[in-house]
Image (tube, rainbow, N blue to C red):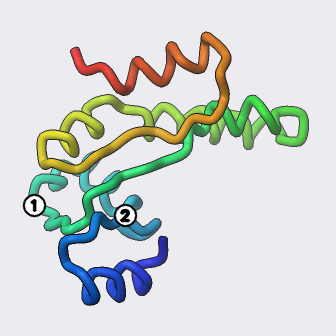
Amino acid sequence: MSESKNDVCYATNPSIHMFMSIKKVALVFVGFYLGFLGLIPMKEAVFDIPMVSLILEQFSDMLSPAQKVLARVANFLMMNRLIFWHLRRRGIKSHPVCVKTKPENFAELLGTMWMV
């Protein structure tokens, strides 16, 4: 959702669960990797991101080798289980969006969902 729509929803009903905007998702990742994620105030209640590996799998024949490497690096950075652990500890429902049902996709999904 866009940040403006989130603000309108929150102004209408502050108890509604809001999704993070793209801008806020980017801020979460930057804050996590720079070490100040704990200092970012969050009123959103849901953190959803797509599994880049599934997108890469589906469109791999249309991507250049450089784009494939970039997608793998993005998947590695976005599927870090510590981000999901931190957000869950703060009370934010967080999970990667997965629509495939292959066993290896479930293994990757469960690797981020189940915390050690």
Badge 1 element: helix
Residue bearing the label numbered 2: 20
| Residues packed near mark 1 inside 10 Å, few (<14), some (14 to 19) or many (20 plus) | few
Numbered disc 2: secondary structure: loop
Residue 67, x across and y down, in percent? 73, 43
Residue at (37, 78) in percent of width and height: 6
Viewer-side residue, 79 vs 71: 79
User: Looking at the picture, does residue 88 appear above or below residue 109?
Assistant: below
Mark seen at residue 39:
1
* Residue 49 location (% of width, % of height): 48, 48
Q: Residue at x 25, y 20 (%)?
A: 115
The kind of residue tagged 2 is Met
Residue found at the far right of this picture = 61
Compare marks 2 and 1 and give the one earlier in the sequence: 2
Q: Where is residue 74 in the image (x, y as percent from the top left)?
A: 53, 41
Q: For the C terminus, which image quadrant?
A: top left
Residue 11 lies, with reference to residue 105, above or below; the image says: below
Disc 2 from disc 1: Cα separation: 16 Å
Task: Tell me: 50 left or right of 15.
Answer: right
- Quadrant position of residue 69: top right
Q: Position of residue 24 (x, y in %)?
A: 35, 66
- Where on the picture, by quarter, is residue 45? bottom left
